[in-house]
Amino acid sequence: MHTLIAKETESVQAETVRFTPGKLHVRFNDGREISLPLAEVPWLKWLAKATSKQRANWSLEPGGLAIYWPDLDDGIEVCHLLNTQSIA
């Protein structure tokens, strides 16, 4: 089953990132957009603690397979955002 998930998500790429109060929103090249509550996702604490200026400075890694925040020296891979496993 993991092979099927990997094949379904391997061509999905991040296109844009935005923030609203308390949430990260990522739009993908297949039209989907996901929203993650920063304070409720343990592996995003580093992003929850970041300033608005730090959050605004992001880039897409080659192929759109990851989002990187150079000011924070950290990032998120698209495969983790699309994983169907619990994020807690």
Image (cartoon, rainbow, N blue to C red):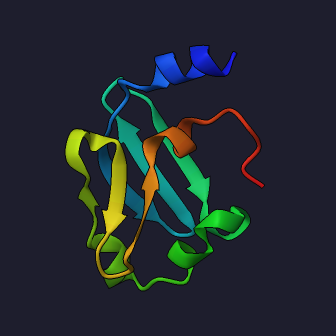
Q: Is residue 52 left or right of residue 46?
A: left
User: Where residue 53 appears, x then y in whole percent?
Assistant: 31, 83
**Residue at image location 59% in from the left, 17% down from the top:** 3
- Quadrant of the rendering where the N terminus is positioned: top right
The answer to which image quadrant residue 59 occupies is bottom left
- Quadrant of the rendering where the C terminus is positioned: bottom right
User: Where residue 71 appears, x then y in whole percent?
Assistant: 31, 82
Q: Is residue 72 left or right of residue 39?
A: left
Q: Is residue 10 left or right of residue 14?
A: right
**Residue at image location 55% in from the left, 83% down from the top:** 49
User: Which residue in the rendered view is the most extreme toward the front?
Assistant: 3
Is 53 drawn above or below residue 56 in the view shown? below
Is 10 drawn above or below residue 4 in the view shown? below
User: Where residue 30 appears, x then y in whole percent?
Assistant: 35, 23
User: Where residue 31 appears, x then y in whole percent?
Assistant: 36, 26
- In front here: 29 or 72? 72
Is 25 drawn above or below residue 85 in the view shown? below
The answer to which image quadrant residue 42 occupies is bottom right
